[in-house]
Image (tube, rainbow, N blue to C red):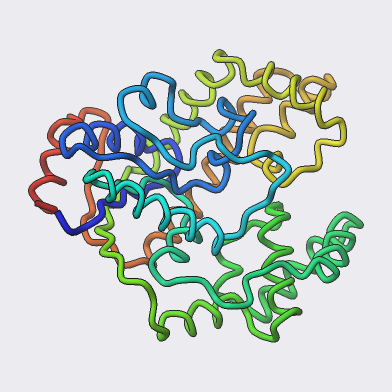
Amino acid sequence: MEVIPTILAPTASGKTNLAVHLAKKIDGEVIGLDSRQIYDQISIGTAQPTTEEMQCVVHHLIGNKPLDEPISAGQYAKLVLDCIDKIKSKQKIPIVCGGAGLYYRALYSGIFDQSKSELTVRKKLEKMYDSGNAQKMMMNLKKIDPDYSEHIHINNRKRLIRALEIYESTGKTLSEHFNDQRSRPRRNINLYSIYLNWDRAILRKRISRRTSKMIKKGWIAEVKNLISIYPDFDLQPLDSIGFKQIVSYLNEQIKLEDLEMEINTKTYQYAVKQIKWFKKEKIDLIIDMDSKINIDKVTKKILSAII
């Protein structure tokens, strides 16, 4: 098999379950493509693969990076490429699996040369954002890079700041950098993209069920532990949906039922952004999903396409 199966979908789509089933069929190993699941100490809140799933199939880039070490899309893409080489050296099949659209684009298109951080510019922008200028910064991004601005929310502090940081540091927008990179020689990896397409109403219900399950599994206790280690709670990975909402719950600012509702709403909004992102990407195989679909049939459909 020459292609690398790459399972893409919005959050709560069942990507990991499918990747595990596929890996068992083709003697594969799974490489995570998730901007948060790569970090340790937040396994519940980022819905990382279960212990059972990771015992059945080897997973890479899951829970192996310290919370205080931020990572860029370019750095992540390089890690994925290294994992691909490692898996292939064992005569196994790499399977990429995740919902991080920017990281996926960095993987198949490469990432621009000036992807390193400019700390002085970043600190200035962080101070602006934290001083209540998020709306102004978002309006600025819409003016300079209307295409990329469609894919981020004003509350996504990290990406908003990063987009403006790149522009101020290089004089080009993120969209311009991506377009430039597409025309440059890059390492030849044959990704075969598989997109799981869910009806939005069903996806919303899946998100709600998963949130309840994560809370029952111990998400609140996980956040309590993080507060004891990082009292300021200001690390990038902790900007993920749900963590600050749970902090508000622990501070008795919201009730449990309101906590779940807020997490569900924000997660669904994020899922919609992921859907819009992947609609603009080149997808090799789209699989329409529903609540009654059989995972074995989906796996067979993928196998018939890639073998």
Image position of 155 with respect to 264: above or below = below
Q: Please report the residue visible at 50 percent of the width from the left and 30 percent of the height from the top.
A: 47
Q: Is 231 situated left or right of 101 in this image? A: right
Quarter of the view holding residue 68: top right
Image position of 34 with respect to 244: above or below = below
Image position of 164 with respect to 98: above or below = below
Quarter of the view holding residue 225: top right
Q: Residue 293: x percent and y percent? A: 20, 32
Q: Please report the residue visible at 12 percent of the width from the left and 35 percent of the height from the top.
A: 297
Pick whichever, 11 or 51, lies toward us.
51
Pick whichever, 189 or 135, lies toward us.
189
Q: Please report the residue visible at 41 percent of the width from the left and 46 percent of the height from the top.
A: 98
Image position of 258 with respect to 83: above or below = above
Q: Is 195 situated left or right of 142 in this image? A: left
Q: Residue 7: x percent and y percent? A: 31, 48
Quarter of the view holding residue 137: bottom right
Q: Please report the residue visible at 81 percent of the width from the left and 66 percent of the height from the top.
A: 119
Q: How many marks?
A: 0
Q: Is 125 situated left or right of 108 in this image? A: right
